[in-house]
Image: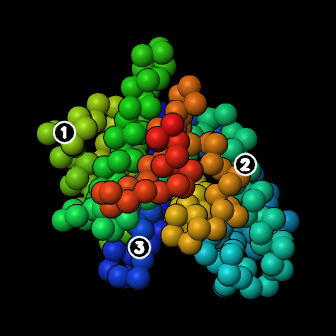
């Protein structure tokens, strides 16, 4: 089984947010324990009195909010990069991200469009594995969200009737929604989503640069990262340059 953990960043209801981000990573089930242990160990070093209560949340780590207020700025930045490093070092994980400019979505809901992109790309990755003899199904797990009902319905529609690029063939069940406090995996997804938001929305590559080569790819062509921009506009971000190459 391969699990795709996702989190969103940016608000459809907030007109000031130009981009809606849905991002995270897929991991083979045998890699979950190793990744979880790495964050547990990092939490023990940073918050030894109650490490299980320390949640790795990108915005809080970057801004020094909540529990992270008591941890120095450089230690927070170092911890963020160390956590991302565990993902990039894991041979069982691949990153995914859809960044959708709200004007590029047209009449569509940008979050649902982002989900369509990510779900279809995850499904195609599983299809490649299947052709290579590694036949495993996939499951999508997201942070608890107001989109729970609509994304579950959308996933069912994709499996039964297809999406604009085909059908989902390798997804075992409708998406599951969990509380980020319950699993370190969603916390990893939050870090990827926050890193991607700072890059696409703010032009800040601080956290994105360390992960940019870890998105699902084949032969140098990146499949796990997409930036949807309004038609006619040129973008020179890492994703768009790779797409034009």
**Element at badge 1?**
loop
Is 225 positioned to the left or the right of 137 in the image? right
Residue 18 in view here: yes
| First reached walking from the N terminus: tag 2 or tag 3 | 3
Residue that badge 3 annotates: 18
* Res 92 quadrant in image: top right
**Element at badge 3?**
loop
The residue drawn where x is 30% and y is 68% is: 103
Residue extending farthest left: 161
User: Disc 2 versus disc 3: distance between alpha carbons?
Assistant: 30 Å
- On the image, the x and y values in percent for residue 183 come to 57, 59
The residue drawn where x is 66% and y is 62% is: 205
Q: Would you place residue 215 above or below residue 13 in this image?
A: above
Q: Residues within 10 Å of mark 2 (few under 14, many from 20)?
A: some
User: Disc 1 versus disc 3: distance between alpha carbons?
Assistant: 28 Å
User: Disc 2 versus disc 1: distance between alpha carbons?
Assistant: 35 Å
Q: Nearer the viewer, mark 1 or mark 3?
A: 3
Q: Residues within 10 Å of mark 3 (few under 14, many from 20)?
A: some
Q: Nearer the viewer, mark 2 or mark 3?
A: 3
Residue that badge 1 annotates: 162
Q: Are marks 1 and 3 in contact (CB under 8 Å)?
A: no
The residue drawn where x is 35% and y is 82% is: 15
- On the image, the x and y values in percent for residue 109 come to 25, 65
Residue that badge 2 annotates: 86
Q: Please tell me which residue lies in front, 28 or 233.
A: 233
Residue 29 in view here: no
* Res 113 quadrant in image: bottom left
């Amino acid at each position: 089984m391969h699990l795709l953990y996702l989190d969103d960043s940016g608000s459809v209801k907030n007109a000031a947010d130009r981009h809606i981000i849905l991002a995270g990573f897929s991991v083979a089930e045998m890699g979950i324990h190793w990744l979880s242990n790495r964050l547990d160990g990092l939490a023990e070093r940073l918050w030894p009195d109650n490490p299980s209560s320390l949640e790795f949340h990108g915005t809080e780590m970057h801004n020094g909010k909540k529990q992270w207020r008591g941890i120095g700025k450089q230690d927070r930045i170092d911890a963020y990069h160390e956590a991302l490093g565990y993902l990039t070092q894991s041979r069982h994980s691949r990153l995914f991200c859809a960044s959708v400019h709200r004007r590029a979505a047209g009449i569509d809901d940008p979050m649902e469009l982002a989900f369509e992109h990510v779900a279809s790309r995850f499904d195609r990755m599983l299809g490649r594995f299947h052709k290579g003899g590694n036949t495993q199904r996939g499951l999508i797990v997201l942070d608890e969200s107001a989109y729970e009902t609509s994304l579950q319905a959308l996933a069912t529609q994709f499996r039964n009737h297809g999406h604009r690029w085909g059908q989902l063939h390798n997804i075992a069940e409708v998406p599951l929604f969990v509380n980020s406090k319950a699993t370190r995996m969603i916390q990893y997804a939050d870090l990827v989503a926050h890193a991607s938001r700072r890059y696409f929305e703010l032009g800040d590559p601080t956290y994105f640069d360390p992960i940019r080569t870890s998105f699902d790819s084949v032969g140098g062509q990146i499949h796990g990262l997409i930036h949807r921009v309004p038609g006619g506009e040129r973008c020179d971000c890492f994703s768009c340059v790779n797409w034009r190459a």
